[in-house]
Image (spheres, rainbow, N blue to C red):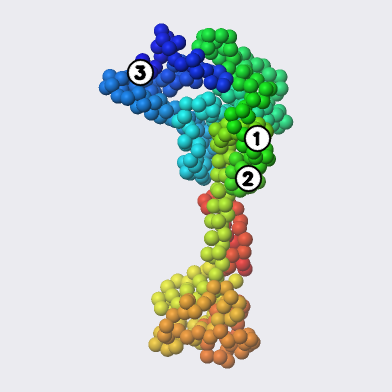
């Protein structure tokens, strides 16, 4: 048999000969039971062609893993759409970038493991959670816990508690809704797996008993790391923690998932795949932090760009002297001698143009790199009284004072003072000093 469902040879599989430590459900066995119907629909045509071409069976494995990967990513896409709806396109973009550039999530999403089958359903739960359909989120987690991974209870309980404390759900309605899903899920897995294992069995209950009650999972490997360190290690980077602090909407999502990791870390036997379902929420937190940091960076960049008024004043002065086009009205002032204004034009470019730069202006954007060659000449002489300027041979003044006797103000330049939000693009306005 090349793959696919063949009810006449179900017992030719080697699960009875090599049962493993604990029984696992056959609902997720991609090549045996049509419980993974969508995977079968996607992979079966390709496998059928491969069987006709007599290709190696490993090609069928690749087809099945690609089908599983597509399904897992499609559930992640559903979650991503809810991220966009709740947090905006910029957070969504960072979420996609973070997820795409991470190794482990994409590596695991094609592996036919109970953890990954549960991951797809947990992604749906996350999406419903963000969407506000809390009972659907709980039902998804119940199904994944009862059928695929009993440890999803460690995520279900903190999430349900948060929803109850925030009054997002009512206890009575949650009980009615969830008990029905529990009974349906238990009936499905017991029916299918009892047939496959040739005994009455609920696989995930046996896993729960083996791992949690008997605490025998440590027989298969122990990481000697404290629970707290392990939880913090898999929480991720500082950006993930920062996201929960920068946006209050993120905190209710992070707390249950972090609690899930913390509770799981109490087990001696630890593997990353056990908590792989926590990654999407932590990536969301990191995406929010990255979005906020980018926004703050944009504001500070624009503020720093606008915070050199003296440099812009000198730039415009050079343009005025050379081209004499309309002056911009942009706390820096450029003054010109009143006698030249009376003549109706600026000083001739054939004469030296002396520009005095006061200390305030010299500290706010003017350096030697801003200076031009002849006929421009510059002075930074300090401690000149305001009344003394008219007795000097300065053609222009770049000065912090609006009124200087003997000179007329040509234009002013505003420096950055603060940010003011506005209800249009861009969403903020840089306000200058007056």
Q: Check disc 2: other Cα within 10 Å, few if <14, some if 14-19, many if 20+.
A: some
For residue 133, which quarter of the picture?
A: top right
Of the two numbered discs 3 and 1 on the same chain, state the one appearing first in sequence: 3
Tell me the mark number nearer the camera, choosing from 1 and 2: 1
Farthest residue to the left: give it.
Answer: 53
Percent x, y of residue 276: 55, 34
Image quadrant holding the N terminus, namely: top left
Q: Quadrant of the C terminus?
A: bottom right
Determine the image quadrant of residue 201: top right
Q: Residue at x 42, y 19 (%)?
A: 31
Label total for image = 3
Q: CA distance from mark 3 to mark 1?
A: 40 Å
Q: Which residue is mark 3?
A: 2
Residue at left offset 47%, top offset 77%: 369
Residue situated in front as seen by the camera: 260 or 18: 18
Q: Dot 1 corresponds to which residue? A: 265
Left or right: residue 183 versus residue 42 is: right
Instruction: Please indicate, yes or no, whether residue 154 appears anywhere in the rendered image.
Output: yes
Q: Position of residue 267 (x, y in %)?
A: 65, 31
Q: Nearer the viewer, residue 399 or 182?
A: 182
Q: Which residue is mark 2?
A: 241
Among the 4 quarters of the image, the one containing residue 178: top right
- Determine the residue located farthest toward the bottom in the rendered image: 391
Q: Is residue 192 above or below residue 101?
A: above
């Amino acid at each position: 048999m090349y793959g696919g469902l063949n009810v006449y040879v179900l017992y030719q599989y080697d699960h009875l000969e090599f049962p493993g430590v604990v029984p696992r459900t056959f609902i997720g066995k991609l090549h045996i039971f049509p419980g993974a119907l969508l995977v079968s629909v996607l992979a079966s045509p390709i496998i059928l062609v491969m069987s006709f071409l007599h290709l190696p069976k490993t090609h069928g494995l690749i087809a099945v893993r690609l089908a599983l990967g597509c399904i897992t990513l499609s559930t992640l896409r559903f979650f991503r759409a809810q991220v966009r709806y709740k947090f905006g396109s910029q957070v969504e973009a960072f979420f996609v970038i973070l997820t795409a550039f991470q190794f482990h999530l994409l590596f695991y999403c094609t592996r036919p493991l109970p953890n990954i089958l549960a991951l797809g359903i947990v992604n749906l739960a996350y999406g419903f959670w963000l969407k506000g359909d809390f009972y659907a989120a709980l039902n998804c987690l119940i199904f994944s816990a009862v059928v695929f991974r009993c440890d999803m209870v460690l995520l279900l309980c903190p999430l349900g508690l948060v929803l109850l404390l925030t009054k997002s759900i009512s206890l009575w309605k949650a009980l009615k809704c969830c008990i029905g899903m529990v009974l349906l899920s238990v009936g499905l897995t017991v029916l299918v797996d009892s047939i496959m294992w040739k005994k009455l069995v609920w696989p995930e209950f046996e896993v729960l008993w083996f791992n949690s009650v008997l605490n025998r999972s440590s027989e298969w490997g122990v990481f000697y790391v404290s629970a707290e360190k392990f939880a913090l290690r898999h929480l991720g980077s500082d950006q993930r923690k920062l996201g929960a602090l920068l946006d209050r909407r993120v905190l209710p999502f992070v707390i249950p998932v972090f609690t899930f990791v913390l509770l799981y870390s109490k087990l001696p036997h630890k593997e990353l795949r056990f908590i792989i379902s926590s990654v999407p929420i932590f990536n969301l937190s990191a995406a929010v932090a990255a979005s906020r940091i980018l926004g703050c960076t944009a504001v500070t960049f624009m503020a720093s760009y606008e915070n050199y008024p003296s440099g812009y004043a000198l730039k415009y002065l050079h343009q005025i002297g050379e081209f004499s086009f309309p002056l911009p009205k942009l706390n820096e002032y450029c003054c010109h001698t009143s006698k030249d204004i009376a003549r109706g034009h600026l000083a001739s470019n054939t004469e030296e143009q002396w520009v005095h730069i006061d200390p305030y202006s010299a500290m706010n954007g003017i350096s030697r790199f801003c200076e031009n060659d002849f006929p421009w000449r510059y002075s930074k002489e300090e401690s000149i009284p305001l009344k003394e300027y008219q007795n000097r041979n300065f053609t222009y003044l770049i000065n912090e004072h609006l009124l200087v006797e003997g000179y007329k103000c040509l234009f002013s330049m505003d420096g950055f003072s603060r940010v003011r939000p506005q209800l249009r693009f861009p969403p903020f306005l840089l306000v200058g000093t007056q």
